[in-house]
Image (spheres, grey):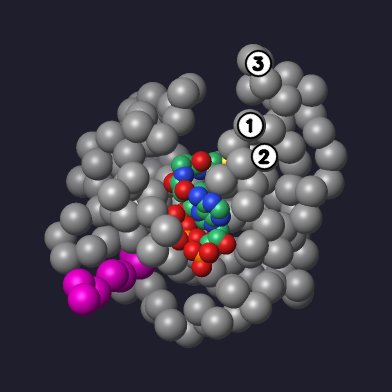
Amino acid sequence: MKEMTIRHVVENDLKTIHRIERSAFKNSYPRSFLKALCRNNKQTFLVAQKEDKVIGYVIANYYGDEGHIISIAIDSSERRRQVGVKLMNSIINVLKKLQVTEIRLEVRKSNIKARKFYEALGFKYLCTIPEYYGDENGMLYTLSIADTSCMLEQCLNSQSLA
Ligand SMILES: CC(C)(COP(=O)(O)OP(=O)(O)OC[C@H]1O[C@@H](n2cnc3c(N)ncnc32)[C@H](O)[C@@H]1OP(=O)(O)O)[C@@H](O)C(=O)NCCC(=O)NCCS
């Protein structure tokens, strides 16, 4: 099996990240925004790489002890192979080291696959944000880092950042 690594983003990754982002989301972030995140949030912007190919990414930021997942997407041909859970495990470990104790994220109400993914990781539904996406409500989920689920625990230490 080809080995997967998780590492911090570099600007050369942005073309592939933008392609994955566009194919995953109806209202995808423009490349200029991804570039700004890459420059300003490098510590909390991770990519999954298989051989020499970027196959997924997660972007977060934090303010004080609260972290926020800005975006996560996996190349459609690589989904359901635990890439997402490994990226989330890695970003949680990064955020823990930055003294974050709680992580929040928003997800479209209709994005049932992503909601199941977050719930499998132990995220709890907190409330609905009306028209968060303009055309759809957002569901706000939260994870207390002390409560990391079994699925995350199983991955602990299985990935180290390059
Ligand atoms: C959501 C997403 C990031 C999940 O990544 P992934 O690598 O496919 O997920 P994993 O293989 O790590 O899944 C971990 C667990 O989450 C749950 N899960 C993931 N995808 C699921 C799906 N399509 N249906 C139901 N449960 C799912 C399962 O419990 C899974 O464990 P299992 O495969 O042992 O049953 C991926 O589907 C994706 O990129 N979607 C498009 C972008 C997106 O919607 N991002 C979230 C925006 S808020």
Residue appearing at x 81%, y 33% in the figure: 128
Secondary structure found at label 1: loop
**Which residue matches tag 3?**
134
**Which residue matches tag 2?**
106
Q: Position of residue 106 (x, y in %)?
A: 67, 39
Residue 110 numbered mark, or none = 1
| Residue range corresponding to the magenta coloring | 1-7
Residue 11 numbered mark, or none = none
In 3D space, how far apart are the residues under numbered discs 1 and 2 (Cα atoms)?
12 Å
Quarter of the picture holding the N terminus: bottom left
* Observer-nearest of 86 and 40: 86
- The earlier-in-sequence mark between 3 and 1 is 1
Disc 1 CB within 8 Å of nearest ligand 1 atom:
no
Q: Amino acid at mark 1?
A: Ser
Q: Amino acid at mark 2?
A: Glu
* Observer-nearest of 56 and 47: 56
